[in-house]
Amino acid sequence: MEIKLRSPLDMHLHFRDDDMMKLVAPLSGDTFAGGVIMPNLVPPVDNLPRLLQYRERIDSALGDRQFDPYMMLFFRQYSQAELELAQKHILGIKLYPAGATTNSEAGVSEIKAVEPTFKLMEEMGIPLMVHGETHGFVMDREREFLSIYEYLARKFPKLKITMEHITTADAVQLLDRYENLRATVTLQHLIITLDDVAGGMLNPHLFCKPIAKRPEDREALLQAALEAHPKLMFGSDSAPHPLSAKECCGCAAGVFTAPLAVARLAQLFDDNGKLDNLQAFISDNAVAQYGVTPPAKEVTVTKKAFKVPAAYEGFGQTVVPMHAGEELSWAVTDIS
């Protein structure tokens, strides 16, 4: 059994920079036709020169792979002139609540204080992507942020808002309440719960933000993905960290899934009898929501054994993936 996927897209992706990017960018470029690149570097990608320089480094790391990096600016107050110059180079702008996740210290502290930029984005048709968490109790952070999504959706009804890496049943329900809301969901949040992270021995390679939630949340996310909800898109949030930053006190947040995401999604959809819906979830929904035209790339995924490497190494970096050392039942067998 096999499936041929047309131009798979990863709508939430961390390439990092420098040697780490040299290692991980090709792993996405091999099996995806494009991806939305997160701008939370140090310093953040929050002006056009910095964005164009980052794009050059990405293109260099990808080499001749057919992959479109969809660039984003890090959210701050922008003038109309700045946005007019940047618009043709970006897919959208990514908002991080200050301190909510990795390299987000320069993020937004008060939503209402930055409404002039939301208004400009709405008028210019620039999408807003949001890391939607408060600073409350860790299991409640996304749920508490949903009221902010509702506020933005009502106040700026023509602003296209993406709830990034949703993790709760409540977020799935919110998708259908407002026409201008859509969402991405990760591979790990379709598979694991908090019990997999911390129910036994702590698994640092499954620790991410937003943290995995309850079984009923995973089930709601999985059902929406399996049915290819038209406003839900695959976004891996593949977030590589050096081994030394994961297996340590103060473990960094992030799950690395880029090299195995396509094969693992095929296995997940096949196990649930929904393989025919994978094309929409991993590509068509994003094309419809964002109006992108990715490179023509056909990825063949076959029902055959694939052993996930224990680690990916190169350029002085070592990164451990999800399912490290485990055998999957689907594998990428051809890319054309």
Image (cartoon, rainbow, N blue to C red):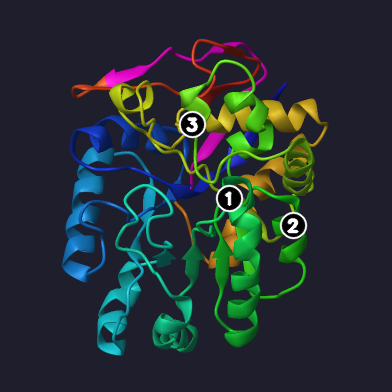
- In the picture of the structure, the residue carrying the numbered disc 2 is 170
- Would you call the spot at circle 3 few (<14 residues within 10 Å), some (14-19), or many (20 or more)? many
Q: Sequence order check: which comes first, mark 2 or mark 1? A: 1
Kindly identify the residue that appears in the image at 41 percent across and 50 percent down: 101
- Would you call the spot at circle 1 few (<14 residues within 10 Å), some (14-19), or many (20 or more)? few
Residues marked 2 and 1 touching at CB (< 8 Å) = no
Residue 327 vs residue 21: left or right? right
User: Which is more foreground, mark 2 or mark 1?
Assistant: 1
Kind of residue indicated by mark 2: Asp
Q: Nearer the viewer, residue 208 or 156?
A: 208
From this viewpoint, is residue 3 visible?
no
Asked which secondary structure carries label 1, the reply is: loop
Q: Answer with the quarter of the image where residue 319 lies.
A: top left
Asked which secondary structure carries label 2, the reply is: helix
The location of residue 40, given as percent across then percent down, is 32, 54
- In the picture of the structure, the residue carrying the numbered disc 1 is 137
- In the picture of the structure, the residue carrying the numbered disc 3 is 257
Q: CA distance from mark 2 to mark 1?
A: 16 Å
Asked if the stretch drawn in magenta spans residue 99, the answer is no
Kindly identify the residue that appears in the image at 64 percent across and 75 percent down: 180
Residues marked 1 and 3 touching at CB (< 8 Å) = no
Placement of the N terminus among the 4 image quadrants: top right
Q: CA distance from mark 1 to mark 3?
A: 27 Å
Residue 35 vs residue 148: left or right? left
